[in-house]
Image: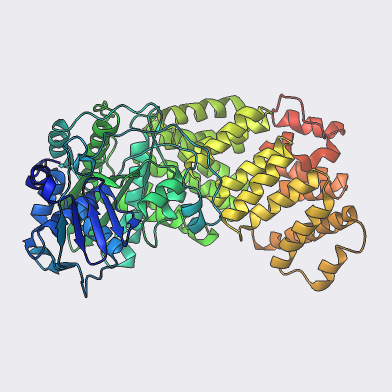
Amino acid sequence: MSGAYNRGMRANASEKAVIRFDSFELELKSGELRRDGALIKLQPQPFRALAFLADRSGQVVTRGEIQREIWGDETFVDYEQGVNFCIKQIRAALGDDAKAPRFIETLPRRGYRFIAPVERDEGNLSRENDLALAPAPDIIISPPEAVPDPSTISAAISATQTRTRVFLVAALAVAMTLALAGYVVWQGREKKAVPPTGKIILVVLPFENLSGDPEQEYFSDGLTEEMITRIGRLQPQRLGVIARTSAMAFKKGGKDITRIGGALGAAYVLEGGVRREADRLRITAQLIQVSDQTHLWAGAYDRRIHDALTIQSEVAESIAQSLAIKLLSGPQPAPAQAHIPSPDSYDAYLRGCYLRNKWTRDDMEKAVGRFEQSVEKDPDYALAHAALAEAWRYLQFFGGARPQDARAKAKNAALKAVALDETLAEARAALASVRFWYDWDWQGAELEFKRALALNPSLASAHHDYGWLLIARERFDEGLAEVKRAQELDPLSPQANVDVGWACIRARRYDEAIAQSRRTMELEPNFAEAWGCLMRAYQYAGRFAEAVAEAQRIMTRSGASQEELAALHRGDAASGMRIVEQWMLNRTKKAAGRGYVSDYHLAAQYAALGEKEQAFKWLEKAYTNRDPMTALLNTDPAYDRLRSEPRFGDFLRRIRVVTQAVRPQ
């Protein structure tokens, strides 16, 4: 801190060691706020602002004066949000109300005034011990720490403050260009950040839609996603990004930076807002260090709407480089200039992403339509082709398309994306997934996954699918590591968490699968797939009574009759499990009338019931129809009853699995 207040406080420390007002004490030497002797948590910058205001009790203090006294003269673009943050934190600590203030009065267009009477005590405050008034420390990243999984998204925020550190990002995607120049000046006048020894972890929080128009939500969400993607490519071995799903868990509600950082294992947070009005676009963003909520960087940009695409590219790169200077000890080589799509194409792409991320069959169908519009309006837009490929795969997953159709559409789009931009990680990952799930081209898929992850190690979906490819080939340690990497990148995603459980089942690590399923249920108690994973883990471990108990929960939630539920307990637990399998088979058959139902799953259900001929019949259909789940046949415990059959080995050869089939234990 280099302002007059810092110098004055040091010069007159003997007169102002403690400032008292009401029942509060500001201990300037230790930088602590107390009320009736009890310590109240207040971060360094809000503390400095409070001390400055209290020292000038009764006087009007402008926002500019607060800015200069807290951050000095090294102005770098926009401190508006930083001052707002400090005042908000002070009021929260004091229990003050902006509408009926007892301590800090807001004077519109003028500034603030501390209105409570104050007392000052003399004391000794040496320059060496003036820690509260010293500049914020250089950035130091601690080694990763393991933490328990959260119990719900809200409980996760408070209960998992030491979660595994995953990666860091810095991002923003639509409009912020001039930040770098001012930031470099500011950075050059500070001490150089100590280069971190481990991987840096950052989360891009959802950019707020400040327009007051729900129809613009797709634009702010798209900006968030684009920044996550762009920053993830910056310096893969040092800088990583929390995946979109977990970041979006904080879209609504308050943003407690400390708790968010703890829940996600992130050392830094990038947040901002977007306002679209008429033909104008305003974007704000700020980078916050989680450990002490220091504002390291802030920016605000005003542009015309028609400039948005150009701004997005320039600003995202500018912010990435600013963060590189701050966190990675130097600028990074600028990537090759990406293709900038036409405005109409980009708008359709953003709308497609917004619909895709709702994860319903109807919205996925609409997303496919939007991505198709995007590539029609700009056939050279590689990212839209990659998104279209993935959307077709997801639509088939929801039963909205048959596997043969999804395979053809997804493969064409993925190949086009790679042809347009061979350095686009999303394109490589889309092609890898098609080659794995539909083509059963193991070597080709693995090569593409490796290329995708070399381009962007923060791409959680690529880690996920690559992990399943390795598991299908019995490379369990490697596969589990990749699936867990996807979970670490997306720690609050119930799907990412339950997939670790399913992967443990394929590796025959049932105790681990049980534990992981329970952790997922703590994260999201009503997530039905976690119930199913727990049931199967108990079943394959031979713990039939516990498996039946979990199955009963699933059946009750699915509307099973009392007679069906009572039937579970008429015999022993093993016979109860057979009743569960028959009930599930009947439901699958009924669902077939509403859309495509996996031939592979039908075969697995017949296999569980010991109906081998029906199982092989549906396996044949799964092979013919290119059901993507067939890729996992080799390690699926559901088919253990069929493994001694020569026909089973024939199926493995036909899908080109060359490793030895796993035998039941």
In this orientation, does residue 435 appear? Answer: no
Quadrant of the image occupied by residue 210: bottom left
Which residue is depicted at the point 46% across and 30% down? 453
Horizontal side of 517 relative to 450 (left or right) equals: right
In this orientation, does residue 498 appear? Answer: yes
Report the coloring of the rendering: rainbow
**Residue 298: x, y in percent?**
21, 46
* Numbered circles on residues, count: 0
On-image quarter of the C terminus: top right
**Residue 140: x, y in percent?**
33, 33
Horizontal side of 168 relative to 438 (left or right) equals: left
User: Does residue 323 lie above or below 406 as drawn?
Assistant: above
Which residue is depicted at the point 46% across and 27% down? 451
Which residue is depicted at the point 37% across and 39% down? 382
Instruction: Farthest residue to the right: give it.
Output: 571
**Residue 229: x, y in percent?**
37, 40
On-image quarter of the N terminus: top left
Horizontal side of 453 relative to 132 (left or right) equals: right
Which residue is depicted at the point 73% across and 35% down? 635
Tell which of 20 and 550 is nearer to you.
20
**Residue 611: x, y in percent?**
87, 48
User: Does residue 368 lie above or below 476 as drawn?
Assistant: below
User: Does residue 262 lie above or below 569 as drawn?
Assistant: above
Horizontal side of 639 relative to 246 (left or right) equals: right
